[in-house]
Image (cartoon, rainbow, N blue to C red):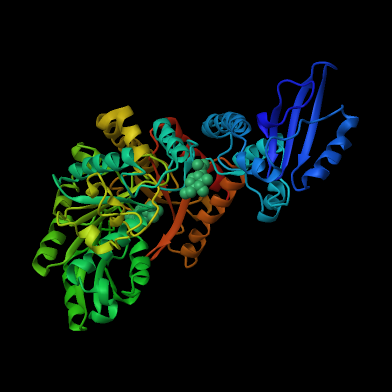
Amino acid sequence: MGGACTFQGSQPVNRYLQCHELVLYKYLNHAKNSLVVVIIDFRIRLPRLYSNLSAFTSLDYVTTTAPSQPYGQQHLNEPLLDHRAGQRFLTEAFKVILEEVLCKGIDVNEKVCEWHEPEELATLLDLELRENGEQQHQLLQRVRDVAKYSVKTNHPRFFNQLFAGVDYHALTGRFLTEALNTSQYTYEVAPVFVLMEDEVLSKLRSLVGWAQGDGIFCPGGTVSNMYAMNLARYRAFPEVKLKGQRALPRLAVFTSQESHYSVMKAAAFQGIGTENVFKVKVDDRGCMITDDLSEKIELAKSQGAVPFLVHATSGTTVRGAFDPLEPIADICDRQGLWMHVDSSVLAQHMTLNPECNYVNVFVIRADSVTWNPHKMMLTGLQCSAILLKDTTDLLKRCHSADATYLFQQDKFYDMSLDTGDKSIQCGRKVDCLKLWLMWKAVGSQGLEERVDRAFAHTRYLVEKMKKREGFQLIGKPEFVNVCFWFIPASLRGKENSPDYQDRLSKVAPVIKERMIKQGTMMVGYQPQGGRVNFFRMIVISPQLSYKDMTFFLDEIERLGNNL
Ligand SMILES: *Cc1c(COP(=O)(O)O)cnc(C)c1O
Ligand SMILES: *[C@@H]1O[C@H](CO)[C@@H](O)[C@H](O)[C@H]1NC(C)=O
């Protein structure tokens, strides 16, 4: 109602809460020097509104001037949201986020996680959604609770995933992205981000070694890998877009035994079939054996399948191993296969440090590369790019559907800026801003320094680990993944006893349970191939120091020694 309705003896009228059809007004009655609260329920028709108002006269006398417009119209003229109240809430919530997530969240004296059994947690959170909205102070408490019971992935002792830590410029980019709330598909609605995405992708491509090409940000490395598979199939069999898989022969994909499981998902999702993913053997470091690749290609052909894609990995998920790209590229050239390099995990392309990027030179020969800045580069979830060497508009030809309501061909600007039809999505979140802002803040040099630092910390950790009894490394770490068994005192020297492997397999899960319940740190474990459960420590965050490495080793010992 705002200015259309005045309350006698009051100035100014301040509407401070509105939910659907209830409007709460608060005003100071100067004549009586008292605060008056009026609730107007618009679900009641106008005549009853007056009588209803008189029900409040116990608070103060209230009369209204006749409304200038009939009720219905007047109501719809008002925005349903109260922006001022919303902004006040956001300001308060922001303080909570700063305190709980960003200050406490990175404090080593605070817990990484606060474990509760699911039923208990559900009760603590009071999850049920109800008919009526809540007061601001209750909602702020909810914000606090969400922060309190969530895992602090920013914490220096969070080593559980391939992401960790916080970059404040990237975070600002993420907040700004959310606030602007646009979709990346056309220049019309995302002029800044269309140009920015192009710049960021071209920068990433240049680090891979390509002066030209194409690419797109995807909702994660899994989806980037799916794009690669779809593009590879489309290049080999363009008719697939129109006629589908039934017009195609049986297809075959090749990837190492230790590649990411998204290859299997992609094969299932795209109708290729998981049984047509040929798993190539790895050597003891976890790198693809190219002789076996050649054999598997011949095997597939002998079964009547048509090879079209080799999915190589630069930095495997568990062991951080690098497939030998040069011989793989030779095989792909000879056989006419699409070569994809999944370098999701690592930001090894960022560094010129010869110790780190020795494995990286031949990525230039690939057709496509997956790069996840949301892992080692700290941009925050999600930020993943599929980069292509292609300059023939393959991405668009493969995925376009020419929606006339978005991609009108008679627009007044250069329509090649409407990049949305390259995507398999319609609305697409802006993922370039966080990376762009962070890059602006620290420069390529700053990003390189972080990668080198993570690498140096890993080396330090490995050296310390070798000197401690009870830590048994699995191979020499190639990059920032450190895989190891912790052997408690009770198992040391018992390697030959028949139940050794069985007992060793139970160590990591117990240590993990203890660390989570005590909230001291988080690190992942897994079995792999013939190896029983072992830990995978990932050193990524630039906020880490040698102290944290020492803490890590001490803590594993503390949690596991009495097993
Ligand atoms: C993490 C990872 C992926 C998947 O990335 P998401 O962004 O989690 O989907 C793919 N490949 C490798 C090698 C990975 O480590
Ligand atoms: C964001 O856009 C969606 C529509 O895509 C809209 O429903 C929503 O209200 C917007 N949110 C914000 C916070 O602007």
435 or 56, nearer to the observer:
56
Residue 101 found in image quarter: top right
Question: Which residue does the image show at 10% across and 63% down from the upper left?
Answer: 333
The x, y position of residue 386, in whole percent, is 28, 52
Q: Say which residue appears at 37% left-offset and 65% top-offset.
A: 529
Q: Name the residue at the right extreme.
A: 58
In front of the other: 503 or 3:
3
Q: State left or right for residue 181 relative to residue 478.
A: right
Q: Among all residues in the image, which is located at the extreme bottom?
A: 303
Q: Position of residue 72 (x, y in %)?
A: 68, 46
Q: In which quarter of the image is residue 176?
A: top left
Toward the viewer: 28 or 513?
28
Image location of residue 238, percent across then percent down: 20, 70
**Residue projecting furthest to the left:** 334
Q: How many marks?
A: 0
Above or below residue 534? Residue 70 is above
Image location of residue 357, percent across then percent down: 21, 43
* Residue plotted at (88% across, 31% down): 57
Above or below 237: residue 555: above
Q: Quadrant of the N terminus?
A: top right
Residue 522 can be seen in this image: no
Residue 512 showing in the rendered view: yes
The foreground one among 546 and 85 is: 85
